Amino acid sequence: MKIAIYPGSFDPITFGHIDIVERACALFDKVILGVAESESKKPLFDVAQRIKLIESIFKDNPKIEVLGYSKKLTVDLARENNAIAIIRGLRAVADFEYEFQLATMNRSLAPDIESIFFTPKDTLIYVSSSLVKEIAQFGGDVSRFVTPNVKAALMEKFSS
């Protein structure tokens, strides 16, 4: 079984993330979304909330598993789950330098695990979780960027 890990904070998950997950499912038997705690990023949703949102989106896809993790290297999460690849998304040239460094470091730590990069559809290339949160915070419509359950969770967070 070919397994890939797609790590991220997914705070919140966007259509860009979903596009990458769906395309990764076409290449792998199983795709594990590793939801990183990411306390340094001061997430809007805690790990349990992010996992619940993601699981409800992919509830009908048996190829997808969602795991939370913290204080652990992504390559260690990959090894623990017998993954052969780490999936990463690239939106713009600005992402490339950081992702290249990360992939090179991961290869140094785990030469048996490949880093695979996906770019989202051109209609989603500008979408980021940070921008979605900012739009939602100021009452903007995020329905073009996130699923209805994520939009509802954002509206609930920012209505209080």
Image: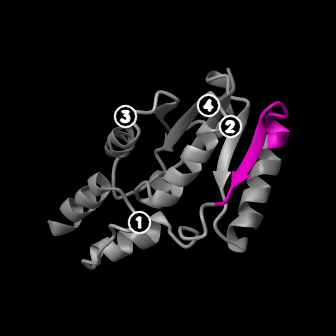
- Dot 1: what SS? loop
Where the C terminus falls, by quadrant?
A: bottom left
Q: Are marks 1 and 4 in contact (CB under 8 Å)?
A: no
What residue is shown with label 2? Answer: 27
Q: Are marks 4 and 2 in contact (CB under 8 Å)?
A: no
Q: Are marks 2 and 3 in contact (CB under 8 Å)?
A: no
Residue drawn at x 16%, y 68% as measured from the top left? 159
| Separation (CA) of disc 3 from disc 1 | 19 Å
2 or 1: tag closer to the N-terminus:
2
- Dot 2: what SS? loop
Q: Which residues are magenta?
A: 107-119
What residue is shown with label 3? Answer: 59
- Callout 4: 10 Å neighbours few (<14), some, many (20+)? some
| Separation (CA) of disc 1 from disc 4 | 28 Å
Residue 82: x, y in percent? 67, 22
Q: Nearer the viewer, mark 1 or mark 4?
A: 1
| Separation (CA) of disc 2 from disc 3 | 19 Å
Residue 40: x, y in percent? 49, 57
| Separation (CA) of disc 2 from disc 1 | 24 Å
